[in-house]
Image: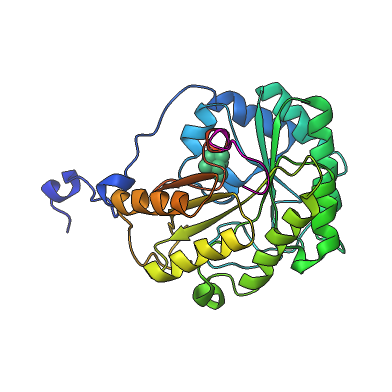
């Protein structure tokens, strides 16, 4: 039987104090939600249960997720459903551009589910989306966060040829944890994707930077994180993000550890010392979190 005093007791948060966030109300959130619904667009913000959604929507920003709302892989950290994929929407590139224009975005981030069922992995659809945004918002910074295209260099080139300013592909975790966290991915292949995007960019205007990110709190060691940062620099990666892993549900891989803000600050300093042009590290950092401000740190060129 529940005592009256028990039911009145405040619920204890499972999170440490630095992961308790005030949820902003108002702002642009309603407008963002209505626009996404009107244009039938997916976002990784809701698809991945991102903890920053209330804040980002209130700021009038979102990260568009193209190629459908279901994924052909089943990464154990990710909330996006791995149901069978549906057909592509031919009008999706235009709808993303329309939404970005109506939101007045100056920095547009587009990501996708992984579509291993498509011959080009969706690279052509990415390229059409980049071009549609460029046409509608010629001055906007365009950032794409792409899957690994199973390592096909031609697909990486299709995306890069459309001229995104930033080509982002996340390594997500340290190689030892891939079988448990990203069983269908391959760490070396992800590094090769980044390296190839940079090779393709040589002598061209864009992409200006490659970018990658990883989560901590999955059971990795400090030396392993350090080695990943070194590998990313070795692949020419210019921008890196490091954030706390949070399990989307009890069915996902559990959180091994909550990393303290001071440790994130140390990672940020270390990554800067390693030569990254821009670094974001913190408990709530995600690839696209304040992506505009992260990009503003960059002053060098693609080989920075
Ligand atoms: S951090 Fe990125 S994915 Fe999360 S809500 Fe903000 S824009 Fe969306």
251 vs 130: above or below: below
Query: How is the rendered protein coloured?
Result: rainbow
The residue shown at (64%, 72%) is: 188
Q: Nearer the viewer, residue 255 or 134?
A: 134
State the residue in front, 119 or 247. Answer: 119
Locate residue 179, reporting x and y percent.
56, 78
Q: Main secondary structure of the magenta part?
A: loop
Identify the residue at image location x=47%, y=59%: 215
Kindly indicate the quadrant of the structure image that contains residue 208. Answer: top right
| Image coords of residue 276 (percent x, y) | 53, 49
Query: Which residue is at a point 66% across and 24% down the rendered structure image?
Result: 103
Highlighted range, magenta: 295-304
Q: Residue at x 69, y 57 (%)?
A: 70
Task: Pick whichever, 205 or 95, lies toward us.
Answer: 205
> Which quadrant of the figure has residue 223?
bottom left
Asked whether residue 234 is drawn in magenta, I would say no
């Amino acid at each position: 039987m529940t005592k009256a005093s028990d039911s009145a007791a405040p619920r204890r948060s499972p999170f440490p104090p630095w992961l308790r966030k005030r949820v902003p109300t108002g702002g642009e959130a309603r407008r963002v939600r209505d626009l996404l619904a009107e244009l039938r667009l997916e976002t990784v913000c809701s698809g991945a249960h991102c903890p920053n959604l209330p804040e980002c929507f209130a700021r009038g920003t979102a990260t568009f997720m193209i190629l459908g709302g279901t994924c052909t892989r089943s990464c154990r950290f990710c909330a996006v459903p791995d149901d069978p994929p549906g057909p592509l929407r031919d009008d999706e590139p235009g709808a993303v551009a329309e939404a970005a224009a109506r939101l007045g975005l100056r920095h547009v981030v587009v990501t996708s589910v992984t579509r291993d069922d498509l011959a080009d992995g969706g690279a052509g659809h990415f390229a059409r989306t980049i071009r549609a945004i460029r046409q509608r918002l010629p001055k906007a910074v365009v950032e794409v966060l792409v899957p690994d295209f199973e390592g096909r260099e031609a697909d990486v080139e299709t995306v890069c040829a459309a001229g995104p300013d930033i080509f982002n592909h996340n390594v997500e975790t340290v190689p030892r944890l891939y079988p448990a966290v990203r069983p269908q991915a391959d760490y070396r292949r992800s590094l090769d994707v980044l390296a190839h995007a940079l090779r393709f960019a040589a002598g061209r205007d864009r992409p200006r930077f490659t970018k990658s990110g990883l989560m901590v709190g999955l059971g990795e060691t400090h030396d392993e994180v350090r080695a990943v940062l070194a590998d990313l620099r070795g692949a020419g990666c210019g921008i890196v993000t490091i954030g706390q892993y949070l399990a989307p549900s009890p069915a996902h891989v559990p959180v091994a550890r909550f990393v303290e803000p001071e440790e994130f600050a140390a990672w940020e300093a270390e990554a800067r010392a390693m030569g990254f042009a821009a670094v974001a590290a913190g408990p709530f950092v995600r690839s696209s979190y304040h992506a505009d401000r992260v990009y503003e740190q960059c002053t060098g060129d693609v080989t920075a």
